[in-house]
Image (spheres, grey):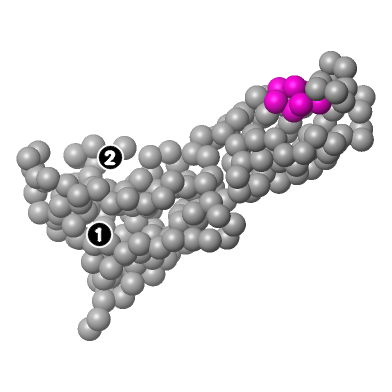
Amino acid sequence: MLGRGDLVHALVALGIAAAPLTACRATTPIVLPEAPTDTTRTALGPGDQVAIKVFDEERFDRELEVEEDGSIDVPFVGAIKVGGMTPSEAAAEIEKALADGYLIDPNVTVVIKARSNREVSVLGQVNAPGSFDWQERLTLVQAISLAGGLTPFAATRRVKITRRTGRGDETTTIEFSLSEVLDGDAEDITLQPGDIVYVPESAI
């Protein structure tokens, strides 16, 4: 997380002169929906591809995708919730399900084959638009700094963040003032994997 000194350096990198921050200044939190993708590096989340292997029982072996509700469809058993679990915890859940009338003392392994989108995209009026690796507690100001800072044409009062809602491919977009964040009148925003930040062009 940015400290006060780091924030000042970040603002300089953004090319914006911010008003002094004061401890007594009230801030208005900006609320976004929770990202459907788990924010830890070991936990499973929607869109992750996993391989399930059951020792000496190849008929159960599958490569599956974690659904939006955090479940996977295990052969002969049905949907099992694994979202937020580590692979070993997911394997234990599958073992319990298989032991309930299917197999005697099953031995299950779960391996992550591919992760869902673990990047944040910063587009529009920034100097180096593109996608960047997401990190825990990555903020909006930090992400824009990664993208080379704002261009002189950036409309800082109409920045947009688009995020998946967790209901299929549905997304939600909010518009807010980055200027207020930089002035200390609004809180900086913590980004989630898959977020898209768009900085529009100001009207000339």
Q: Secondary structure at mark 1?
A: helix
> Residue 120: x percent and y percent?
47, 53
Question: Which one is in front, 190 or 1?
Answer: 190
Q: Is residue 44 above or below residue 104?
A: below
Q: Secondary structure at mark 2?
A: loop
Quarter of the image with the N terminus is: top left
Q: CA distance from mark 2 to mark 1?
A: 16 Å
Amino acid found under the numbered disc labelled 2:
Leu
> Residue 94: x percent and y percent?
74, 28
Residue at the image position 33 percent from the left and 72 percent from the top: 200
Q: Is residue 197 above or below residue 50?
A: below
Per the image, the residue denoted by label 1 is: 178
Q: Which residues are magenta?
A: 92-98
Asked if one can make out residue 146 in the rendered structure from this viewpoint, the answer is yes
**Horizontal arrangement in the rendering, residue 6 relative to residue 160 (left or right):** left
**Horizontal arrangement in the rendering, residue 21 relative to residue 92 (left or right):** left
Comes first in the chain, label 2 or label 1:
2
The kind of secondary structure the magenta stretch mainly shows is helix
* 160 is within the stretch colored magenta: no
Give the number of the disc on residue 2: 2
Quarter of the image with the C terminus is: bottom left
> Residue 21: x percent and y percent?
11, 46
